[in-house]
Image (tube, helix red, strand yellow):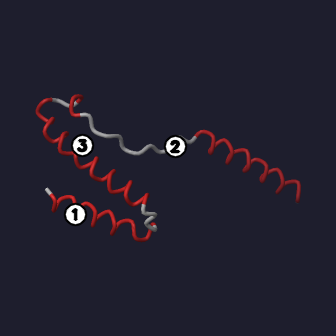
Amino acid sequence: MSAFTETHLNQFIVVAAVALLVTVPARSQGLVDPSKVAPEYREAAEKRRAEQIRQRECALKADLEKVLPRDRTDYLNHCLDAIAAKQ
């Protein structure tokens, strides 16, 4: 009985290793490039890029200030609101 279980365990380990090797790492969303968008959508793309830059600035501030993961969302929302208030 143990040989039967050991064979299945070995097969499982091989399948798990192959699955881990085949997976593709997730990539974060890149900045929108307004020059690569159709002209009718360019204004929206420029606004989206500006928003992405603001979000990245706030995320960088959170990283530099070592904000805990549980507090990160509140920090980012507050940071984005402060940037919006300045404009």
Query: Along the polypeptide, which appears first: circle 3 or circle 2?
Result: 2
Q: Secondary structure at mark 1?
A: helix
Q: Position of residue 80 (x, y in %)?
A: 25, 60
Foreground mark, 1 or 2, reads 1
Residue 2 appears left or right of 26: right
Q: Secondary structure at mark 2?
A: loop
Real-space Cα distance between discs 1 and 2? 34 Å
Q: Residues within 10 Å of mark 1 (few under 14, many from 20)?
A: few
Q: Give the amino acid at mark 3.
A: Arg
Instruction: Residue 85: name its quadrant.
Output: bottom left
Instruction: Residue 4: name its quadrant.
Output: bottom right
Real-space Cα distance between discs 3 and 1? 18 Å
- Residue at position x 52%, y 43% from top? 25
Position of residue 12 relative to residue 39, above or below, is below
Callout 3–callout 2 Cβ contact below 8 Å:
no
Q: Give the amino acid at mark 1.
A: Ala
Residue nearest the viewer, comparing 45 with 8? 45
Classify the position of the N terminus by image quarter: bottom right
Callout 3–callout 1 Cβ contact below 8 Å:
no
Q: Position of residue 6 (x, y in %)?
A: 84, 54
Q: Position of residue 52 (x, y in %)?
A: 28, 48
Disc number for residue 25: 2
Foreground mark, 3 or 2, reads 3
Q: Residues within 10 Å of mark 2 (few under 14, many from 20)?
A: few
Disc number for residue 49: 3
Q: Secondary structure at mark 3?
A: helix
Classify the position of the C terminus by image quarter: bottom left
Residue nearest the viewer, comparing 73 with 7? 73
The residue under label 1 is 82
